[in-house]
Image: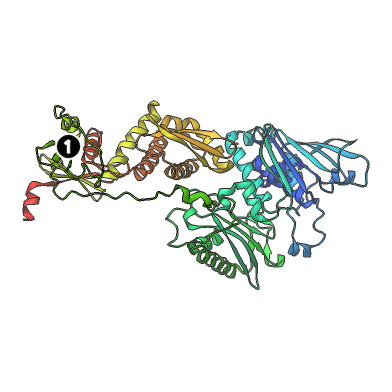
């Protein structure tokens, strides 16, 4: 087989595949370049989730005309001049691949000017070819517009996800960069609508609040540690704020976001026995280390990093988070800096004006007998003052004995001798062959599964409207997730409407769920966990069953406690009408019959 050197345009397209995987990759690279250029204000403009346009405008130092042309060449960089410089990298970009890779798979227009020049330059690129360079009037800084991403690679463009999915990835990358530099103002606009507008902030905590909301800041505590290998600062969530959805977990080193499953384990180890299984706390951990002890060049997008002293860093993170958990467990502390803390009520000087001069006392009639026929006795009337009244009361009562009030309640009465609820977990009732025991949660799961599967296949659902709609802040990414699955949730009976850029309103839920304040927030977080797990999937038989099972488990776990034999009887009746009352969709047993002869053996 004969070896050949690939043509430059094909080699550039292959190389671009490592750096530019989707529109969010373009946003990341261009934002990082703007930060490296010393910008104090960075605007990101996106159309059609980045398919049509990704534009980044900054007020940084800009480029000379010569550099504006040279920057599209592969490995053109101002950050490195020798191999030694690789050991002291403190900037985002340094390999000179970003603009070359983007220009290989899109149409790019660059406008830039430096302060010492009166005019700027415009460079147009497409498929790695310079389509023209001209002098233009523009402000100091850089304005780069990337249009029609993957226009020359139709197969790659076809594999992009829906607009909501791609926009979620863009929001993720935007937040990761914005969280590293609170001193810079950032704006993200999609299809003419502002998603994030954050001004320069006084601290990382204020930047977190601006991006993710006051609710997140209200649930985090400071952490810090200084060792010979690293300086650690940041914030971690209180155990009670842990969620089943992954989100708001950030590691930064020397101002750069990175992923680390290893250090994530250190955080989770510190939360052992503090958070429910399957829940993850928020954390924002900023590390400063000697650049010579970290390799940021092991991943095409620099998302993963290699540390020399990884085990010591693990112990540092573990100790810092544990110490923070110890401080956060102190009860009764008042955080006056908490933006969502409740105000302390103040009692006015006129408070005593409303204090009653005397407090009424309750009377007790020791001779009261409710079974006596005498009407006054039946009502607890006594010579000393009537029903439950103290001496001196003049209240009178009249009862029409011709009315049979007991009959009003006869239809609601269920013989408790036929059904029994044990510890809120089991129902015991008589069957033809002995004693039937029903597992309450699994019975509910079976019924919800049947209902949801029918809703997914036949578009039939029942929604119970909430007494009061409940607003739940889910963040911009969470809002986009709900938008993406609005049709699916509607088919299942969830009436959840968008509200603003980062909030949803729960107007109604399927029968069996609860939309009460407090429970609604938990429900929304659980729904997000399920929807994120099924990201990018389509309904097709097996997937419908899997979704129905997950929603059924969620609904059964969130169901209210059975409090009456009537409710228990209804549950049993509904279960016995199911196609498979003995097992859940996961194959777990729901009911069991203890034969009469087995009962006899116990006596």
- Name the side, left or right, on which 220 lies relative to 449: right
Q: Position of residue 563 (x, y in %)?
A: 26, 43
Residue at mark 1: 414
Q: Is residue 8 above or below residue 313?
A: above
Quarter placement of the C terminus: bottom left
Q: Compare residues 356 and 412 and report the one nearer the observer.
A: 356
Q: Position of residue 444 (x, y in %)?
A: 30, 40
Q: Is residue 142 above or below residue 508?
A: below
Q: Compare residues 312 and 13 and report the one nearer the observer.
A: 312
Can residue 243 be seen from the camera position used here?
Answer: no
* Residue positioned 16% across, 33% down in the render: 406
User: Dot 1: few (<14), some (14–19), or many (≥20) neighbours within 10 Å?
Assistant: few
Q: Quadrant of residue 409?
A: top left
- Number of marks: 1
Q: Position of residue 275 (x, y in %)?
A: 45, 57
* Rendering colour mode: rainbow
Q: Is residue 354 above or below residue 455?
A: below
- Extreme bottom residue here? 228
Q: Could you say whether the residue bearing mark 1 is in a helix, strand or loop?
A: loop
* Residue positioned 51% across, 55% down in the render: 281
- Name the side, left or right, on which 432 lies relative to 480: left
- Extreme front residue here? 392
Q: Position of residue 432 (x, y in %)?
A: 10, 39
- Name the side, left or right, on which 592 lies relative to 218: left
Can residue 256 be seen from the camera position used here?
Answer: yes
Q: Is residue 421 above or below residue 374?
A: below
- Name the side, left or right, on which 262 lies relative to 582: right
């Amino acid at each position: 087989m004969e070896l050949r050197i690939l043509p430059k345009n094909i080699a550039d397209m292959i190389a671009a595949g490592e750096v530019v995987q989707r529109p969010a990759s373009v946003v990341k690279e261009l934002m990082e370049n703007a930060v490296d250029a010393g910008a104090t204000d960075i605007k990101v403009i996106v159309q059609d989730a980045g398919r049509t346009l990704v534009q980044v405008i900054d007020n940084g130092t800009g480029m000379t005309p010569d550099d504006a042309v040279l920057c599209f060449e592969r490995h053109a960089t101002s950050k490195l001049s020798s191999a030694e410089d690789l050991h002291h990298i403190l900037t985002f970009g340094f390999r000179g691949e970003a603009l070359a890779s983007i220009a290989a798979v899109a149409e790019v227009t660059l406008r830039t000017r430096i302060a010492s020049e009166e005019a700027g330059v415009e460079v147009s690129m497409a498929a790695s070819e310079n389509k023209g360079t001209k002098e233009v009037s523009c402000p100091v800084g850089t304005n780069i517009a990337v249009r029609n991403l993957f226009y020359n690679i139709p197969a790659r463009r076809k594999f992009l996800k829906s607009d909501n999915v791609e926009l979620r990835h863009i929001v993720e990358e935007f937040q990761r960069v914005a969280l590293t530099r609170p001193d810079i103002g950032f704006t993200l606009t999609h299809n003419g609508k502002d998603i994030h507008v954050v001004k320069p902030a006084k601290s990382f905590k204020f930047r977190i609040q601006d991006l993710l909301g006051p609710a997140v800041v209200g649930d985090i505590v400071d952490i810090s540690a200084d060792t010979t290998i690293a300086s650690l600062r940041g914030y971690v969530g209180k155990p009670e704020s842990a969620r089943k959805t992954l989100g708001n977990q950030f590691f930064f080193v020397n101002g750069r976001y990175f992923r680390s499953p290893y250090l994530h384990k250190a955080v989770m180890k510190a939360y052992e026995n503090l958070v429910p299984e399957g829940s993850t706390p928020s954390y924002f951990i900023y590390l400063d280390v000697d650049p010579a002890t970290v390799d940021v060049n092991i991943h095409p997008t620099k998302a993963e990093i290699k540390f020399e002293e990884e085990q010591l860093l693990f112990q540092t993170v573990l100790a810092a988070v544990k110490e923070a958990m110890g401080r956060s467990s102190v009860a009764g502390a008042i955080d006056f800096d908490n933006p969502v803390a409740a105000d302390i009520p103040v009692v006015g000087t006129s408070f005593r004006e409303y204090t009653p001069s005397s407090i009424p006392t309750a009377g007790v009639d020791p001779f009261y007998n409710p079974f006596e026929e005498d009407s006054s006795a039946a009502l607890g009337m006594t010579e000393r003052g009537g029903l439950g009244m103290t001496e001196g009361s003049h209240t009178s009562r009249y009862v029409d004995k011709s009315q049979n009030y007991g009959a009003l309640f006869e239809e609601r009465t269920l013989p408790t001798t036929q059904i029994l609820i044990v510890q809120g977990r089991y129902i015991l009732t008589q069957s033809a062959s002995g004693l039937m025991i029903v597992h309450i949660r699994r019975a509910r799961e079976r019924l919800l599964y049947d209902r949801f599967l029918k809703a997914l296949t036949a578009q039939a659902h029942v929604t119970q409207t909430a007494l009061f709609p409940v607003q739940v802040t889910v963040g911009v990414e969470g809002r986009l997730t709900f938008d993406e699955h609005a049709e699916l949730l509607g088919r299942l009976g969830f009436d959840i409407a968008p509200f603003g850029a980062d909030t949803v309103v729960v107007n109604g839920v399927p029968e069996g769920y609860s939309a009460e304040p407090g429970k609604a927030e938990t429900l929304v977080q659980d729904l997000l966990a399920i929807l994120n797990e099924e990201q990018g999937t389509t309904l097709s038989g097996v997937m419908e069953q899997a979704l129905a099972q997950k929603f059924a488990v969620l609904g059964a776990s969130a169901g209210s406690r059975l409090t009456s034999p009537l409710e228990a009887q209804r549950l049993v009746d509904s279960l016995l009408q199911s196609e498979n009352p003995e097992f859940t969709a996961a194959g777990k047993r729901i009911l069991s019959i203890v034969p009469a002869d087995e009962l006899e053996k116990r006596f």
